[in-house]
């Protein structure tokens, strides 16, 4: 027997394994058939009772919707982003928040104005910049209330005008009130110019001959001066009576009045010079451009243009005054004061 087992050991082991496998199969097959019958019965019961299917979690639904429609990052006005904080500046060893700081970085321009107009407030020379090359600095645009980033908005071009006392061209007129004469019910006043003036009676050739004018008329050769009044006056000096009658002239351009005393009636007579400003040489300089000179005569129009020549404004030289030169546009009057090239004309509401 021992010899038989040793000779046929492998067959014995194989037979034993086969018998074990058959036994296990005989046990599992009935169990499997019973489990399948249980699932079939459960499925039939579910269909018969129409039980609701389990609902997915609300959190899962929300997460799925967010994945389908991701949130888009919106840029903020203060320059911060999803990965970069709002900018801070280091000033005098301390961090400054331009958005919250009440003290302006570049007076008089508020920090918020710089941020609202998307200007680089980290640039220490920002107020002197001209972002759109319009010919005006950021500070000038702030003072004018215009947007430095809008190529179609301009401060008044007249703010770039300047002049000095030597830029004014003027003439001086001096007349002697010689006498008067009543002819045919009207009084003619005789005036003699001390400088040669055009004489209409002689083909406008300049001379110093006597000119005659009645009340309400202008003086021949000086059409801007009008006779508006005459007053007969006497004055006694050392028991001697003198004729100090006065003739009043009006400058029709400025409204100024000048009183001439009769020449041959008093030892106190003095010549009365009358100045007439005829033109001015303006200096016009836009930021980033060379200076231009513009000669303008009283009462004449002149045009100013932007750097690219696409924007223009037309003004009229209205008058000269002690405050400055008066120019007009669209019913408004601007006063250009004699000062440095950076002077700014002050608009008035005079129509």
Image: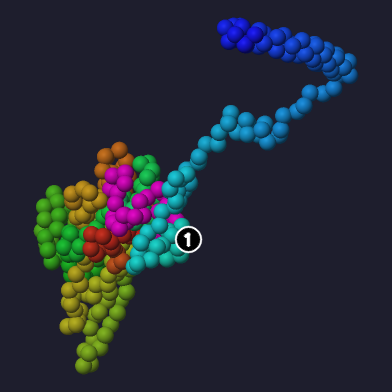
Task: Name the foreground residue: 178 vs 198.
Answer: 198
| Quadrant hosting residue 335 | bottom left
Label 1 neighbour load within 10 Å: few <14, some 14-19, many 20+: few
Q: Is residue 279 visible?
A: no
| Quadrant hosting residue 243 | bottom left
Residue found at x 30% / y 38%: 310
Task: Name the foreground residue: 120 vs 309.
Answer: 120
Q: Is residue 341 visible?
A: yes
Residue lying furthest bottom in this view?
A: 238
Residue at label 1? 100
| Quadrant hosting residue 33 | top right
State whether residue 61 is above or below residue 119. above
Q: Give the left or right position of residue 147, taking residue 65 as reference.
A: left
Quadrant of the image containing the C terminus: bottom left
Residue lying furthest right in this view?
A: 49
Residue found at x 77% / y 10%: 26
State whether residue 316 is above or below residue 57. below
Q: Give the left or right position of residue 240, taking residue 229 as reference.
A: left
Q: Is residue 309 shown in magenta?
A: no
Range shown magenta: 108-135
Task: Name the foreground residue: 331 vs 298.
Answer: 331
Residue found at x 37% / y 59%: 89
Q: Is residue 111 shown in magenta?
A: yes
């Amino acid at each position: 027997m021992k010899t038989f087992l040793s000779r046929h050991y492998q067959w014995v082991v194989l037979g034993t394994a086969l018998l074990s496998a058959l036994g296990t199969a005989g046990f599992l097959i009935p169990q499997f058939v019973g489990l399948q019958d249980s699932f079939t019965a459960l499925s039939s019961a579910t269909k018969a009772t129409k039980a609701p299917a389990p609902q997915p979690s609300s959190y899962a639904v929300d997460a799925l919707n967010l994945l389908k429609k991701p949130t888009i990052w919106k840029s903020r006005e203060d320059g911060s982003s999803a990965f970069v904080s709002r900018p801070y500046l280091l000033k005098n060893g301390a961090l400054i928040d331009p958005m919250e700081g009440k003290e302006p970085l570049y007076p008089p321009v508020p920090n918020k104005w710089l941020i609202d107009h998307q200007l680089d407030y980290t640039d220490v020379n920002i107020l002197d910049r001209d972002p759109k090359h319009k010919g005006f600095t950021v500070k000038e645009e702030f003072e004018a209330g215009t947007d430095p980033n809008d190529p179609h908005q301009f401060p008044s071009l007249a703010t770039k005008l300047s002049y000095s006392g030597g830029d004014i061209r003027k003439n001086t007129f001096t007349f002697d009130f010689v006498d008067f004469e009543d002819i045919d019910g009207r009084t003619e006043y005789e005036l003699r110019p001390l400088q040669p003036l055009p004489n209409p009676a002689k083909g406008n050739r300049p001379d110093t001959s006597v000119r005659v004018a009645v009340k309400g008329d202008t003086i021949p050769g000086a059409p801007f001066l009008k006779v508006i009044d005459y007053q007969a006056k006497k004055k006694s000096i050392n028991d001697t009576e003198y004729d100090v009658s006065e003739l009043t002239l009006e400058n029709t351009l400025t409204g100024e009045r000048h009183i001439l005393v009769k020449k041959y009636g008093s030892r106190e007579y003095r010549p009365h010079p009358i100045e007439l400003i005829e033109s001015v040489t303006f200096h016009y300089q836009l930021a980033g451009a060379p200076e231009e000179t513009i000669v303008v005569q009283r009462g004449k129009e002149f045009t100013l243009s932007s750097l690219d020549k696409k924007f223009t404004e037309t003004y009229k030289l209205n008058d000269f005054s002690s405050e400055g030169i008066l120019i007009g546009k669209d019913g408004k009057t601007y006063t250009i004061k004699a000062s440095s090239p950076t002077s700014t004309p002050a608009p008035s509401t005079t129509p």
